Amino acid sequence: MNQMWLLRMARWLRHPPSPKRVKLVLVVLAACLALYAVERWIGWPDALTAERMRAPMRVSQ
């Protein structure tokens, strides 16, 4: 850990985020965890899987 992180932590302790910001971060974190859990237990839908495109065939002259 370098000095920048210590300064950031000290600043955060002096000026903590508002309760609204904390709730927002927790909601976003919960949504990410829920999406990960659904993907892990149910699986990723095939319709959302990108397929690799093949390179076009080149005609030699």
Image (cartoon, rainbow, N blue to C red):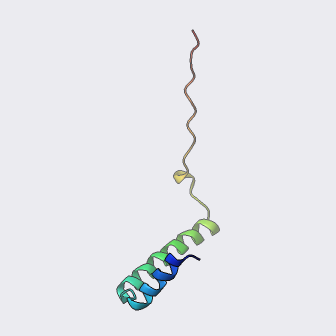
Q: Residue at x 55, y 37 (%)?
A: 53
Q: Residue at x 48, y 74 (%)?
A: 31
Pick whichever, 32 or 17, lies toward us. Answer: 17
- Residue 57 x/y as whole percent: 57, 23
Residue 17 in the figure: left or right of residue 52: left
Establish if 16 lies above or below 52: below
Q: Which quadrant, please, contains the N terminus?
A: bottom right
- Residue 7 x/y as whole percent: 47, 81
Say which quarter of the image contains residue 42. Answer: bottom right
- Residue 13 x/y as whole percent: 44, 90
Find the residue positioned furthest to the top. 61
Find the residue positioned furthest to the right. 41
Q: Which quadrant, please, contains the C terminus?
A: top right
Say which quarter of the image contains residue 15. Answer: bottom left
- Residue 46 x/y as whole percent: 57, 52
Q: Residue at x 58, y 41 (%)?
A: 52
Pick whichever, 23 or 48, lies toward us. Answer: 23
